[in-house]
Amino acid sequence: MRGEHLVQLERTYHYPEKGVTINDWDKHSKYIIKVVAPTDVACAFFDYSQNFNMAAHTIATYLLESERGDISKLDTYFFSLAFLYRHSIELILKAIAFQYIEIQTDQASFVKDTFHNLEIILQTIEENFHTSRPDAEMIWLRTYFSDISKIDRESDSFRYPFHIVWESDDWLISGKFTIKRIFEEQTHIDLIKFANKFEAAYEILKKWYHRDTAPANEYVDLNPVFIEEGGYYYGQSVVGYAYNRDDFFPYTKAYLETANYLRQYMKVHCLSKDEECANNLFMPMCYLYRNCAELSLKTIWFEETGEDFQIRCKTMLDKKHSILGLWNLIKLYAVECGNGDGDEEYIGMLENYCKQLHTLDSDASKFRYPVQKDMKPYFNSNRRFDFWTVGKFLEALNNALDSIDSALSVTNEYKAEMEAAYRSEMMGDYDPY
């Protein structure tokens, strides 16, 4: 871990504005980045892996070397940090595979067969292609990825607070939806070891990708166990509190604030003429914002609507990652929050923001991968974006959704208090004799 160019996270309060589009950019802006259309799939996946690893390293450095001692950040940022590191590993594994698999249909089959499971991806590569990495490194990777897959096989354990699973009855005729928590009990994670192991795994895979025969060093003294507890007090992430196991808030906070940090980090580097930094961190920043928006919409639907539990679960699974689909679920509840002048127009602006994000990325994959499942590029030609404008747009959407969630929460608490008071009053007036 190296502490370089630490940036102070500044709190910002952007909200939707009329006429703003996510694609707005001015050729005179200092914050223009270019998204390059991929020509080589293996190279494209490797570049994305480098970018997500850089984003993870940047956040880890901020948490562990800034000496700010904010324990709340350690406990919440863990979720987005874990995703960034884990996704960088998935991307570079696939980059290695695509060095061997050159036919597009075969590449698509590989993705379909291995999905997001790091253990299976590595196993499939080893079974079909030669590796020159030392046996000790490969044994360490196999053990480490196997342990990761016990917790996160599908790359969603650190994007969402729980899994919704279907439990069949004894006769397999019917069943019900239940919640499976990621962390069943309070866990004190050694964040320094957690980050260092991902960095060590990435070092091995990077040498493998470059066909570098020199041995890796960082993994040698590290135990290939995904999560170790303990460590220095200001280097721990404490997750799995009993009172908020199902709570979306730590996740939305993590994804929004780490996205804001990356945006400010990119700005500082742009102003110091390091334009490459912004190009590298743009996709990770966008994904963090995008996942926060999805989480916020699901928070409103799952925690504040009062719908039947089974209906909430089924509908969330049906909508999957659709921003527009989730917005349509909660729109009526959002309208109910407003009762003043201009509220209807504001809801219209918010809906427009949701539509724009959905149009840009309908399946939560465009910011994560360079190609679709059929291996066709997400960007067929080079595109320019103003990362500051995109970031403000996405932050505004998230801030607005958070406001709706807060308003509904206050309303629901008030209704609960009134109902409790009414019941108490009725019970007090009731005389059975």
Image: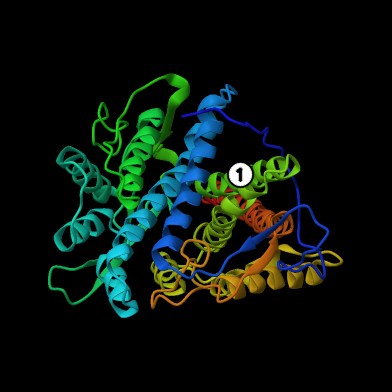
Foreground of the two, 76 or 226: 226
56 sits to left or right of 29: left
Residue 232 visible from this viewpoint: yes
**Of the residues shown, which amino acid type is indicated by label 1?**
Glu
Point out residue 396 in the picture as x, y percentages from the top left corner.
71, 57
Point out residue 274 in the picture as x, y percentages from the top left corner.
67, 43
Q: Quadrant of residue 262?
A: top right
Q: Quadrant of residue 233?
A: top left
Foreground of the two, 150 or 97: 97
Foreground of the two, 389 or 214: 214
Residue located at (43% from left, 49% from top): 83
Foreground of the two, 351 or 100: 100
Residue 419 visible from this viewpoint: no
The residue sitting at the right extreme is 341
Residue located at (66% from left, 45% from top): 266
Residue occupied by mark 1: 257
Give the vertical position of 385 relative to 414 (above or below). Answer: below
Residue located at (39% from left, 74% from top): 373
42 sits to left or right of 52: left
Give the vertical position of 147 relative to 26 (above or below). Answer: above
> Could you tell me which secondary element the residue under label 1 belongs to?
helix
Q: Quadrant of residue 155?
A: bottom left
Colour pattern: rainbow
Q: Residues within 10 Å of mark 1 (few under 14, many from 20)?
A: many
Point out residue 73 in the picture as x, y percentages from the top left corner.
54, 34
Point out residue 199 in the picture as x, y percentages from the top left corner.
38, 38
Residue located at (38% from left, 48% from top): 86
286 sits to left or right of 273: left
